[in-house]
């Protein structure tokens, strides 16, 4: 299953909440938008698991 929905790759720095888009770039800040389906934004992020677990509750 493939998602066409992308998320601003720097939303944590640039926005108060995740910015989703169907485009390849963020409509608000112009940063690269990445697919939401693949795993973590940052493999080194120690909070990645936690954020992924609660992402649906945040929206
Ligand atoms: Zn953005």
Image (tube, helix red, strand yellow):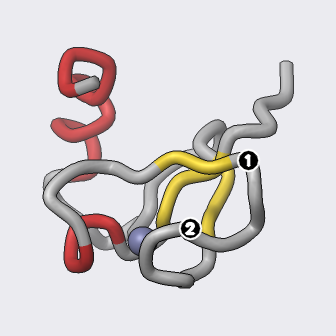
Marks 2 and 1 sit apart, C-alpha to C-alpha, by 9 Å
Q: Position of residue 58 (x, y in %)?
A: 19, 26
Judged from the image, the secondary structure of the residue bearing numbered disc 2 is loop
Write the residue at 67% across / 51% down: 35
- From the Cβ of disc 2, is ligand 1 less than 8 Å away? yes
Asked whether, in this view, residue 58 is left or right of residue 8, the answer is: left
Judged from the image, the secondary structure of the residue bearing numbered disc 1 is loop
Asked whether, in this view, residue 36 is left or right of residue 57, the answer is: right
Q: Nearer the viewer, residue 4 or 44?
A: 4
Write the residue at 85% across / 19% down: 1
Q: How many marks?
A: 2
Q: Which of the four quarters of the rendered structure image does ligand 1 lie in?
A: bottom left
**Farthest residue, direction bottom:** 30
Label disc, if present, on residue 5 of the rendered structure = none
Asked whether, in this view, residue 1 is left or right of residue 21, the answer is: right
Q: Position of residue 11 (x, y in %)?
A: 32, 66
Q: Nearer the viewer, residue 3 or 19?
A: 19
Q: Quadrant of the C terminus?
A: top left
Asked whether, in this view, residue 22 is left or right of residue 34, the answer is: right
Q: Looking at the image, is 58 positioned above or below residue 19?
A: above
Write the residue at 77% across / 31% down: 3
Q: Nearer the viewer, mark 2 or mark 1?
A: 2
Residue tagged 2 = 27
Residue tagged 1 = 22
Q: Quadrant of residue 23?
A: bottom right
**Counting other residues with Cα less than 10 Å from the Cα at mark 1, is it few (<14), some (14-19), or many (20 or more)?**
some
**Counting other residues with Cα less than 10 Å from the Cα at mark 2, is it few (<14), some (14-19), or many (20 or more)?**
some
**Farthest residue, direction front:** 28
Write the residue at 32% across / 19% down: 56
Q: Position of residue 57 (x, y in %)?
A: 21, 16
Q: Looking at the image, is 43 positioned above or below residue 55?
A: below
Q: Nearer the viewer, residue 9 or 51?
A: 9
């Amino acid at each position: 299953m493939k998602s066409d929905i992308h998320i601003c790759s720097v939303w944590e720095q640039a926005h108060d909440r995740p910015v989703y888009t169907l485009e390849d770039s963020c409509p608000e800040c112009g940063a690269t938008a990445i697919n939401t389906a693949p795993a973590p934004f940052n493999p080194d992020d120690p909070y990645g698991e936690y954020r992924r677990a609660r992402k649906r509750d945040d929206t």
